[in-house]
Amino acid sequence: MSAMRTLVRGGTVVSATGRRRADVLIEGERIVALLAGDDRGTTERAVGGDGEVDRVIDATGRYVLPGGVDVHTHLELPVSGTVSADDYTTGTRAALLGGTTTIVDYAGQDRGGGLLEGVERWRARAAGRTCGDHAFHLMVTDVRPDVLEEMADVVAAGVTSFKLFTAYPDTNYSDDGRILAAMQRCAELGATVMMHAENGIAIDVLRAQAIARGDTEPIHHLLTRPVSFEAEAVHRAVVLAEVAGCELVIVHISSADALAEAVAGRDRGLPVFAETCPQYLWLAIEDVPDGIDGARLVCSPPLRWRRDGHQDVLWDGIATGRVDVVGTDHCPFTWEDKLRGRGDFTRIPNGVGVIEHRLDLLHQGVVDGRLSLERFVEVACTAPARLAGLHPRKGEIAVGADADLVVYDPAATHRLSALTHHMAVDHSAFEGLEVTGRTETVLLRGRVVVEDGEHVGAPGDGREVPRGPNTLPMAEPGGG
Ligand code: URP
Ligand code: ZN
Ligand code: ZN
């Protein structure tokens, strides 16, 4: 039986380097031709007319984007007696509906446990249940000599990045010595360190003091995690990575000060990469309501003051190349779970739901003149695919690549709301925000899985994608 042929016709194909009118021809799971120009004859000659393809998707007036790649998600993440609300099916379905066809989720090591058993546990949870493609990083929460040895087996198993934490002393934290040892091992193995950089030891002192004073509301979560504790931890991570000689990604950067420390490392010629997330671009402490309602905006690192200009600096960092990728750190909890923190903000499970909105929130930046259309594609699709070692199979519309395509309507407006989103969470961090631009049709390896904004695929459509090393080039010192 010959492979199914699909033609995506009449759209503007956007890449990290430009845009052009082109038709995309797909055979089976791969892109086989990009037929350029306004001359319909090019396509007719190559394809042999509409009758010679099985399906034609009209993309007239639309952008045709590479499927989005979200390199930072936490689906079904066990956290202090509960679990993040989106499972592998609901989370990847919401991702597809928002134009993200591949996620890189964080598997985790149990303290006292091994690394591969963590990877295998997460793999078993995801297997046969994802609607889009997936891959894994691994959170290392217990750096021991045997664990350092085992890191080689994890890389051999296709998980090429390890998350380390200077935060969360009770659960995930590693001290500087353990971080250095793990970084040295990453350097030997050609693996990448993903760093959660906040000074968790110092934060815990401020948290205990706040609770003792009776400052127990969600807002005090934000006020006990100062910008300086994030910037200091980024600085420390860069210094340790420099000594170790490893590649370092500072994940979920929330502040101008933290970004400046990452950029300072890069400007010294170090392979330091920066990730931010839509919540830090769009939301701020000023948006946090009084009382327990503020729990819906509790995440770590926390939101920052808009009046101090952090959002503008992060947007500018995206536009100029100082920020390399935009992931989501998608980690939503139901309102019932968030209420665990009533009367004690330290008990609020951390995280917000963003996986469905990443492309729209970034595209709104294009509409608002904050970044170019090409840069939008780069930070949402191409650069994350490179960072995760998934490029050129993912993140690019090119002959031979997986046919993961998003037909995106740049003019459609819609309002983000818990009433209409598809994430399995009963509140929205972005409630009421109107955005221009919407995912209309999505193809996953050549199959239509979203049609007119409706999911038409099924759990199990997704597969784990093998990862290689990071291929994201180091940025030029001083800029993009
Ligand atoms: O609040 C957050 N970010 N929760 C997810 C865990 C993490 O640190 O990335
Ligand atoms: Zn983190
Ligand atoms: Zn995270």
Image (cartoon, rainbow, N blue to C red):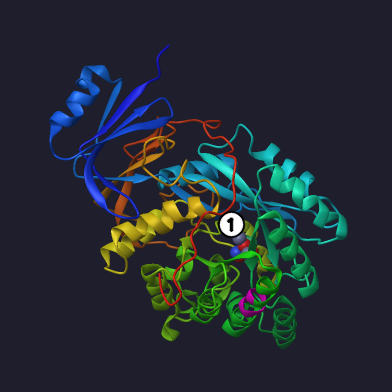
Q: Which residue is at 73% across, 47% downward?
A: 154
From the viewer's perspective, is residue 466 above or below residue 479? above
Question: Looking at the figure, which quarter contains the C terminus?
Answer: bottom left
Q: Which residue is at 56% across, 31% downward?
A: 460
406 or 41: nearer the viewer: 41
From the viewer's perspective, is residue 268 above or below residue 359? below
Expressed as whole percent of the image width and height from the top left, the position of residue 47 reads 24, 23
Give the image quadrant in which the ligand numbered 3 is located: bottom right
Q: Which segment did they paint magenta?
A: 234-238
State whether label 1 is within 8 Å of ligand 1. yes
Name the side, left or right, on which 282 lies relative to 293. left
Q: Image quarter for residue 396?
A: top left
Per the image, the residue denoted by label 1 is 331
Report the amino acid beneath label 1: Cys
Prevailing secondary structure class for the magenta stretch in the rendered image:
helix
Q: Image quarter for residue 295?
A: bottom right
Q: Give SS at disc 1.
A: loop
Question: Looking at the figure, which quarter contains the N terminus?
Answer: top left
**Is residue 270 shown in magenta?**
no
Q: In this orientation, does residue 461 appear?
A: yes
